[in-house]
Image (cartoon, grey):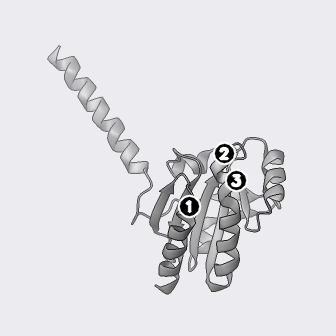
Amino acid sequence: MLRATRHVLVATAAVAMSVCAFAIAPATVAPDFTLRTTDGPNLRLQEQRGRVVMVNFWATWCGPCRKEMPQLNRLYDKYKSSGFVLLGVNVDEDTRNAVAVAAKLGVKFPVLLDTDKKTSQAYDLNAMPSTVLIDRDGRVRHVHRGYVDGTEDTYEAQIRALLKE
């Protein structure tokens, strides 16, 4: 009995450590990815080094995601000429639906397609939307899970601070 309990505890600890090892957290290097854009070409995160990058994971079925889009457009328009990049990573399996909803919402920033969910898994996606702010050196600085009115004010303050660094 003691031996079985020990095996269960060791296995549980190993799983917990592996989950923690992959969890996205501030000060960690942002996992690199290459995803196809809705326009066709691929975009690689690592190619954005030297810029402040916001990665926003969203889905067409997510109400808060849709509500957040106009605010993200505003931030993108305001800071894109200052070295800011906003990447919308759509997690839907039906890319046609993602393209249609992005067009309907007037999304101005690049929309990337994560149909196989590998990027979402690398970023430990567990809430929708999820937003990650990455500094010019490629390190995660801020992680936001979900969206409520006013979150965009926090985004803007964090973007401004990172652009000043």
Going 37% across and 47% down the picture, which residue do you hit?
Answer: 20
Verify CB contact (< 8 Å) between mark 2 and mark 3.
yes
Frontmost of labels 2 and 1 is 2
The structure residue drawn at horizontal position 40% and vertical position 43%, both measured from the top left corner, is 19
Which of the 4 image quadrants contains residue 7? top left
> Considering the numbered disc 1 on the image, is that residue within a helix, a strand or a loop?
loop
Which residue is most to the top? 1
Disc 3 target residue? 66
Which residue is labeled 1 in the image? 32
> What residue sits 33% from the left and 43% below the top?
17
The residue indicated by pointer 2 is 62
| Between discs 2 and 1, the one toward the N terminus | 1
Residues at marks 2 and 1, CA–CA distance in whole angstroms: 25 Å
Residue 117 location, quadrant: top right
Identity of the residue drawn at 41% across and 58% down: 25
State which tag comes first along the sequence, 1 or 3: 1
